[in-house]
Amino acid sequence: PDAAPMLFSDGDDPFRPAGAWEHVVYKPNKKTGRAIWEVSYHRFEEQKEHPETIGITQVSGRAILPATVMGHVMEALLHGRPVSLRRAREEGGMQFPNRGQWEALREAA
C-alpha cells in the first residue's frame, strides 16, 4: 500500500491550488507580455492538446521537448493555476510521490 501510485479522479477535474506559491515570480516576455509557460499551459489545460503535439507545433517553428511542455504546466501550478494531474501523469509522463514518499516528506517537514 505504501508504494501504491497516487490515484486521480476519472474525470478531467483539475487540481486547484489555494493560490500561487509565495516565492514564485511572474516573468512576462517583453514581446508578448505573457510568460513563456502560459502558451503551453493554455494549450494543455484549456485546449486539451497532447504534450507531444504542443512540443512539435510551436509558433517559433522550433520544437521543444514534451518534458519542457510539462515543466511549463507545472510552472502554471506554482502560479496557482488549475492543472489536471491525471492528464499530466497519463499524457505528460509526470511522476508523483506515492503514499510512502508523501509520509516521509511529511515526517521530514
Image (cartoon, rainbow, N blue to C red):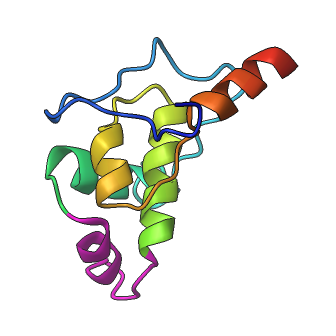
Task: Tell me residue 108's x, y (percent).
Answer: 86, 21
Q: Is residue 43 above or below residue 66?
A: above
Front-most of residues 30 and 49: 49
What is the magenta range?
A: 50-65
Magenta stretch mostly in which secondary structure? Answer: loop
Tag count:
0
Which of the 4 quarters of the picture holds residue 55?
Answer: bottom left
Task: Mark yes or no: residue 41 visible.
Answer: no
Q: Residue at x 69, y 22 (%)?
A: 103
Which of the 4 quarters of the picture holds residue 86?
Answer: top left
Q: Is residue 37 above or below residue 54?
A: above
Instruction: Report the side of 41 relative to 43 (left or right).
Output: right
Q: Residue at x 81, y 16 (%)?
A: 107
Is 60 in the magenta? Answer: yes
Task: Tell me residue 2's x, y (percent).
Answer: 59, 31
Q: Residue at x 35, y 58 (%)?
A: 40
Task: Tell me residue 61's x, y (percent).
Answer: 33, 88
Front-most of residues 87 and 20: 87
Instruction: Report the side of 72 relative to 105 (left or right).
Output: left
Instruction: Report the side of 62 relative to 74 (left or right).
Output: left
Front-most of residues 25 and 16: 16
Front-most of residues 48 and 43: 48
Is 23 in the magenta? Answer: no
Which of the 4 quarters of the picture holds residue 97?
Answer: top right
Q: Residue at x 39, y 30 (%)?
A: 81
Residue lying furthest front in this view?
1
Instruction: Report the side of 108 relative to 25 (left or right).
Output: right
Task: Tell me residue 78's x, y (percent).
Answer: 55, 33
